[in-house]
Image (tube, helix red, strand yellow):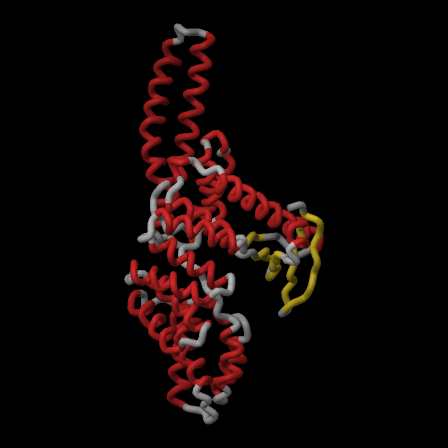
Amino acid sequence: MEFIGFETCIKAKENEYHLKTASDIQQNQLNSVMIKNGMVQTVNESIRIDDTVEADIKQKVRQVHDERVEIIYLLLEFSQNMPLSVDNAVWRDRLGMGFFNSGMYEEAIGEFQKAVDRDPLYSQALNHLGEAHFNSGDCRRAIEYLELAVKQKPDFADFHLDLAEAYLKVGRCDDSYNSAERALIINSFYGRAYYLRALALLMQTVYLDYTEPNEELTQRIQNDISSAVSIDSSLKSGGYETAWQHLENGDYKDALAILESNAKMPGSQKFSTAKLKTYIKLAMSLDKLSYDEVFDYIAYLEEKLDKNPQFADLHYELGAAHSILGNIFASRASKYYKRALEVNPDYSKARSNLNISENLDQGTESLLKTILNSRDVGC
């Protein structure tokens, strides 16, 4: 995947940079990086840049491209050479999310299917398999797997919401409305659930061909949309104000066309590239993991925790990251104490410290195995 350049175009007052690689051209595909308000925005991450000088943007776009290529190669290598000790549903699901977030839906479907084959009751893999089929355009199979995920885990709001999205795509308005409502019963502070419930009602209204404005109906739709954007301000993008005006005028069809374009399947359980890369290298071999990568992962988690201190998973992941770092230090310490003893077998202090570091190795090994094979929802 050699980087061979990029194109620039203006879209909705934003600079969109299309990354072009050799494989992209062969498959007639382009990856995009959005530049907005001094931010480089990719599918998974946002990277802060100081200004939008053309040369700096080129450098950042190239950096995003190189990072994406690195994780793709790592995913492919690990998928083909996965150690038997971690060849389970959890790890196949993780790999699937890595491919999914890279837009490689065919590979993602393959990994999610392997996860389900290894554990047919793994609801997260069933849900992700449904999402991958949805993104690849096969809504019928998407709904099949998303319904299975909801059946396995009916108390998880994300699953109901993903199913509502798929129902909406095929015009099953009542089912979409009901699924969004179930998500809100589980989690009333869920902006996109209000948004999808409004869309389901609006789409049904358009299908019924209401030509006259209906004040009660308009109010119901506006109430949900208002609740949605008050919780999740990102939903205001994509012509929100224009759509609101169409609702005021009873132009339901025009309002739907605008609001529907802003309703993309959010994807439950976001799994960060930083975490996945760290875990894969750890699973392959501790020697493949560098200090800098673990420190970068810790910095990433600390930044997330500053904004979301209420998320227990982030605290757990930070503890896991420090455990990984501690294991690296302990194992490397053992190596150097052994070298000291090779030079001087009577070096009592080195032997004493070696015993301490080896005990640390043994103490963290079982913990790391638990962390690596845990059924996490990611961050």
* Image coordinates for residue 290, horizontal then vertical, percent: 50, 33
Q: What residue is rendered at 47% in x and 46% in y?
A: 300
* Image coordinates for residue 20, horizontal then vertical, percent: 67, 53
Where 358 falls versus 147 (above or below)?
above
Q: What residue is rendered at 35% in x and 70% in y?
A: 179
* Image coordinates for residue 370, horizontal then vertical, percent: 33, 38
Residue 42 visible in the picture: yes
Q: Can you tell which quarter of the image residue 317 is in?
A: top left
Where 265 falls versus 105 (above or below)?
below
Residue 45 visible in the picture: no
Q: What residue is rendered at 42% in x and 60% in y?
A: 130
Residue situated in front as seen by the camera: 110 or 260: 110
91 left or right of 255 in image: left
65 left or right of 281 in image: right
* Image coordinates for residue 345, horizontal then vertical, percent: 41, 7
Where 281 falls versus 334 (above or below)?
below
Q: What residue is rendered at 43% in x and 73% in y?
A: 168
